[in-house]
Amino acid sequence: MDIRSLNDEEVDAALEFSFHQLIDTTQFFKFKDYYDLALKKYKELARNYHQENNTLFIGYYLEDKLVGLLEINDCYINQIAVDRNFRNQGIGYNLFFFAIRNKKDGEIVCLDAAMNIVHYYEKWGFVINGELNKKTNSIKMKYTVSNKNKSYW
């Protein structure tokens, strides 16, 4: 197992991993004809967004294979994605606590959680901090950093 920040050369592969997980989770693209075009556009938009917002990419590797990814800028988590074959093994949890290891006591970390996975984030210490977004079926959550919760790293 290797958890680390990704360098610029690894970001393209990370964005492709992110796209695959998005498709796998949402079944967004069912037609192969549009896949390559959509991937290209996703990478372009995501790279621009992440450059503008100074996003840090953190990867979880098993035997040199990227199986988990966390994207965070300042105190907002854009995405936590884990390969379907490696879910429910604590990878997202480990990525999250790796990402906040240098945050100060009392800092707030936020994310928008899909309603079907809110319970995972609650186990990590997140609390609901907003109303349900009916369009995306997601809700804002926040986590208050505490040094006692960071002892893992």
Image (spheres, rainbow, N blue to C red):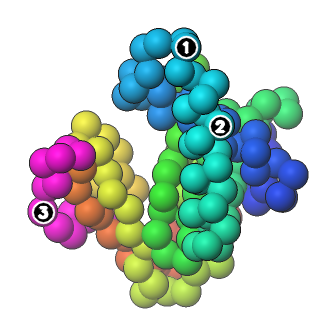
Horizontal and vertical percent position of residue 53 = 58, 73
Left or right of 58 on screen, residue 76: left
> Quick one: quadrant of the C terminus?
bottom right
Instruction: Residue type at mark 1: give it.
Output: Asp
Name the front one of labels 1 and 3: 1
Q: Residue at x 57, y 42 (%)?
A: 42
How far apart are the two marked residues, 1 and 3, measured between alpha carbons?
A: 37 Å
The answer to whether any part of residue 87 appears in the image is no
Residue located beneath label 1 in the image: 33
Mark positioned earlier in the residue sequence (2 or 3): 2
- Does the CB distance between marks 1 and 3 fall below 8 Å? no
Disc assigned to residue 40 = 2
Disc assigned to residue 131 = 3
Horizontal and vertical percent position of residue 8 = 83, 58
Question: Secondary structure under badge 3?
Answer: strand
Rate crowding at label 3 as few (under 14), some (14 to 19) or many (20 or more) other CA atoms within 10 Å: few
Choose top left, top right, bottom left or bottom right for residue 99: bottom right
Question: Secondary structure under badge 2?
Answer: helix
> Quick one: quadrant of the N terminus?
top right
Left or right of 12 on screen, residue 131: left
How far apart are the two marked residues, 2 and 3, measured between alpha carbons?
A: 33 Å
The stretch of residues the image draws in magenta is 125-137
Q: Residue at x 79, y 31 (%)?
A: 65
Instruction: Residue type at mark 2: give it.
Output: Lys
- Does the CB distance between marks 2 and 1 fall below 8 Å? no
Question: Secondary structure under badge 1?
Answer: helix
Mark positioned earlier in the residue sequence (2 or 1): 1
Instruction: Residue type at mark 3: give it.
Output: Glu
Q: Nearer the viewer, residue 98 or 151?
A: 98
How far apart are the two marked residues, 2 and 1, measured between alpha carbons?
A: 13 Å
